[in-house]
Image: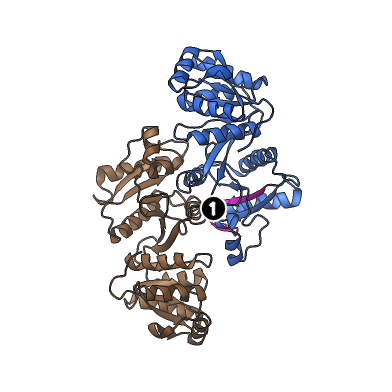
Chain colours: A blue, B brown
């Protein structure tokens, strides 16, 4: 995808994980990021050796206890010695507990949310999706927080004025579908009060075909500044977001990555089912955000 | 897709529509179905001539008034002279009002629901999705009704024991995600009481990757009788269903069609944004159901 900022570094909590070390090794070789591997150094060395990975280019911090390793990786990020946090061979909940600790964590005061990136054969640019993994059923204010996180992240990627589609099942506000009324309210607030400043184009409700297909807009007579050219697809809840994410990754053949944003620095929570390429893209995104 | 039952016929309400006539013409030529075109016969003849369609093989009933044409097309189906209803150049609401009329309509006492079929390069068989278009936020009983409709339709297609994935954002029941608890209840009722008889395999909650990727199940240690081999993806609400439908049709390059089921006979409500091929597949499905 892209090269990193000068010397960006990722702190890995409990780094003795084959897939994570493989992705980290690839990221180092492509010049995307450096890594501080926190965990049991003997375990890390063993997993690296088993997978033919040379650890010379890595910094290793020996913290054998899992809870302590999570805390140390978070501390590296909170103190600015690392630029992003990555989960290794440990439960997501343990990493998040350390990251969200009110005293020693990396809270920023903002809501956490997930953003994913997809490279699709059938679309003319990268397509971003939020939120497929963190927020279950956000209310109106929660939706605006998630949007603010995502728009900020896209600005960091150099998209000066991202086009945002608020996705529902149809393109007209309908009281029987409450989310369409919320979307109309968000779009209106943005138009009237510059809710997200002049730095985003937001339209909704839109159906997904309107967001990604200019032809679909033309046939349906929809004149939207986002129509057919969306950068970001905003999903109404975690079910819709997760189903969209999985359909693009597993049925549309997309290359994809995802990152948790809203803390002081990005958090990479790839799962074992993600491909090595997906983990690498997630690392690249975290460095760019 | 498939050839029709002997002489199946589709009644079209307000048939003076170029895309509908093109799809009907293709269906006749492929031997999928015959058509009774209800509407203004001069308008129908004009649109057919403009599109180079020979109406010799079609039956035309001259009913110039829209409301009356909807009512007549429904009456053809309700009386058994036609096997499916198709919307032409008229609002969906007008067709549905006629179809759902308590005296003269084609109600069966069952809930109406939508089922769509997708042929994907990245999946080893046809994949069906319900409900992307009719039921907004069905409760537990509503979900079971929609499932019963879809399973019955798949039986009609010759799938003796369809594998059904109840889709959520994760594969474990979680009280914070109410739909996962409903899914666990439906799956349990089906296991314990044979809710859908012995004629379906139902599992949930599942995430979409578990439903369509055996590899994903293996990596995550999920042992599901549906895993990686789902026939039917059940979506929790209209937003998730519609977003999945559109992602497959517009971003995954699927060939697709969809039909409303649960009335006495299927109803085809294709929209103008659907391709001619999609309309043709919808006609074929309606005849097969």
Residue sitting at 46 percent across and 41 percent down? B169
Q: Which residues are magenta?
A: A162-179
Residue B76 sits in quarter: bottom left
Task: Specify whether B11 is left or right of A22.
Answer: left
Residue B9 part of the magenta segment: no
In front here: A237 or A31? A31
Considering depth in this image, is B160 or B131 the residue closer to the camera? B160
Residue A160 x %, y %: 72, 44
Residue drawn at point x = 27 percent, y = 51 percent:
B161
Q: Which percent across, then down, holds residue A244?
A: 50, 47
Q: Is residue B285 left or right of residue B90?
A: left
Please tell me which residue lies in front, A31 or B193: A31
Residue A135 visible, this orientation: no
Residue appearing at x 56%, y 56% in the figure? A207
Quadrant of image for the C terminus of chain B: bottom left
The residue indicated by pointer 1 is A122
């Amino acid at each position: 995808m892209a090269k990193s900022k000068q010397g960006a570094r990722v702190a890995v909590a409990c780094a003795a994980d084959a897939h994570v070390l493989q992705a980290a090794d690839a990221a180092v070789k492509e010049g995307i990021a450096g890594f501080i591997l926190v965990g049991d150094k003997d375990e890390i060395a063993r997993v690296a050796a088993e997978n033919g990975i040379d650890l010379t280019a890595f910094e290793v911090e020996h913290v054998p206890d899992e809870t302590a390793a999570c805390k140390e990786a978070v501390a590296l990020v909170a103190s600015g010695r690392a630029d992003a946090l990555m989960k290794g061979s440990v439960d997501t909940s343990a990493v998040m507990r350390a990251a969200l600790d009110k005293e020693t964590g990396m809270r920023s005061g903002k809501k956490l949310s997930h953003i994913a990136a997809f490279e699709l054969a059938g679309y003319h640019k990268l397509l971003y999706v939020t939120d497929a993994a963190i927020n279950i059923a956000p209310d109106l204010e929660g939706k605006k927080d998630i949007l603010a996180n995502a728009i900020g992240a896209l600005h960091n990627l150099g998209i000066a004025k991202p086009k945002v589609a608020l996705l529902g099942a149809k393109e007209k506000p309908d009281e029987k579908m409450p989310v369409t009324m919320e979307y109309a309210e968000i779009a209106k607030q943005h138009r009237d009060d510059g809710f997200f400043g002049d730095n985003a184009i937001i339209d909704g409700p839109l159906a997904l075909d309107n967001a990604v297909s200019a032809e679909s807009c033309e046939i349906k007579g929809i004149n939207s500044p986002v129509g057919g050219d969306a950068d970001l697809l905003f999903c109404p809840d975690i079910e819709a977001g997760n189903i969209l994410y999985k359909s693009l990754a597993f049925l549309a053949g997309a290359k994809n990555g995802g990152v948790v944003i809203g803390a002081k620095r990005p958090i990479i929570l790839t799962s074992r089912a993600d491909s090595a390429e997906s983990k690498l893209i997630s690392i690249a995104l975290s460095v760019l955000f």
